[in-house]
Amino acid sequence: MLTNTLNLLPLFTIVLFRTASVLFFSPIYNQTSIPLIAKIGLSIVLALAIFPTISSAQMTLPDNMTSFILLIFKEIAIGFLIGYVSTLAFGAFVMAGELITTDMGLSMAEIVDPVFGDRVSTVSQIFQLMAFLLFLSINGHHWLINALVLSYKTVPITGFIEHGFTISKLVQMFTGLFVSAIKVAAPIMIIMGLVVVVSGFMAKSMPQLNIFLIIFPMKILIGFLILAMLFPFITRSMEYLLNLLRKDIFSLVGGM
């Protein structure tokens, strides 16, 4: 019994590295507020659950340390792809919030983003928190684990990634990131642009009016009012983009 366990330990170690890299680079699980020991424990539990589904028959692991380490790096790269790609939609929401914040004149009001580790605007943080809730409501944390399990069928432990398809898919998803950000922010950006045009006409028609003292607080007030009115439509757009993300991830994993 002990001998069989020791023989399976190298294979389990490889499974653990792919599982851990998915969790450490994916949304929700990569939060800095989650203790490191909790992430490691969850990785071990998931690896133990996935391990029996992997057939060790007809699988020859490297017999030297160098090849074994290279295999581990390959597993980390696969986990990184799955985990990091799943954060692209959240990056789109952060970018949309930044575009809206810039038009509202709140660029100086920034807080630390716990996911990307950078300073983001308050609107971006609101969008991201809402995206996290939607991600959980559509069982995003479940389909992320399903994508991990599927990856062992498309890229076995001793297999290789299909680089051509993977790179083209990543480029397509990064392009969609910018398009999605503009789509989410476009309604408010258009309205804020109209506010600037109206303020320009006011400045021309009433030269004695100091338009700069009026336009900045007016843009902030109108921006938050429009944001509140459009928030139901924004959340629907976020849910739609997260469902597209699910399809893209499974398409990426399936074509590896």
Image (tube, rainbow, N blue to C red):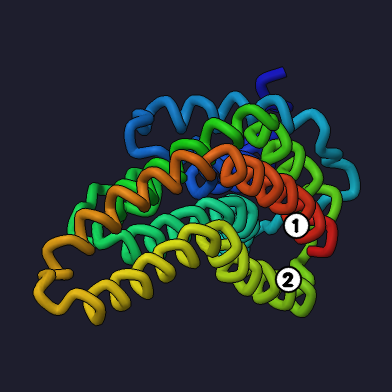
Residue type (three-letter) at the residue carrying disc 1: Asp
Q: Of 254 and 107, which appears nearest the observer?
A: 107
On the image, the x and y values in percent for residue 13 come to 60, 41
Structural distance between the alpha carbons of marks 1 and 2: 8 Å
Which of the labelled discs sits on residue 248, or is there none? 1
> Dot 1 lies on which element?
helix
- Taking the spot 81% from the left edge, 58% from the top edge, the residue there is 251
Q: Residues within 10 Å of mark 2 (few under 14, many from 20)?
A: some
Tag 2 residue = 169
Residue type (three-letter) at the residue carrying disc 2: Lys
- Taking the spot 36% from the left edge, 45% from the top edge, the residue there is 224
Residue with the most extreme top position? 1
Left or right? Give the position of 64 relative to 96.
right
Image-quadrant location for residue 19: top right
The quadrant the N terminus occupies is top right
Left or right? Give the position of 57 relative to 26.
right
Q: Of 79 and 88, which appears nearest the observer?
A: 88
Which of marks 2 and 1 precedes in the sequence?
2
Q: Are marks 1 and 2 in contact (CB under 8 Å)?
A: yes
- Taking the spot 30% from the left edge, 53% from the top edge, the residue there is 121
Look at the picture and state if 6 lies above or below 123. above
- Taking the spot 71% from the left edge, 47% from the top edge, the residue there is 240
Q: Residues within 10 Å of mark 1 (few under 14, many from 20)?
A: some
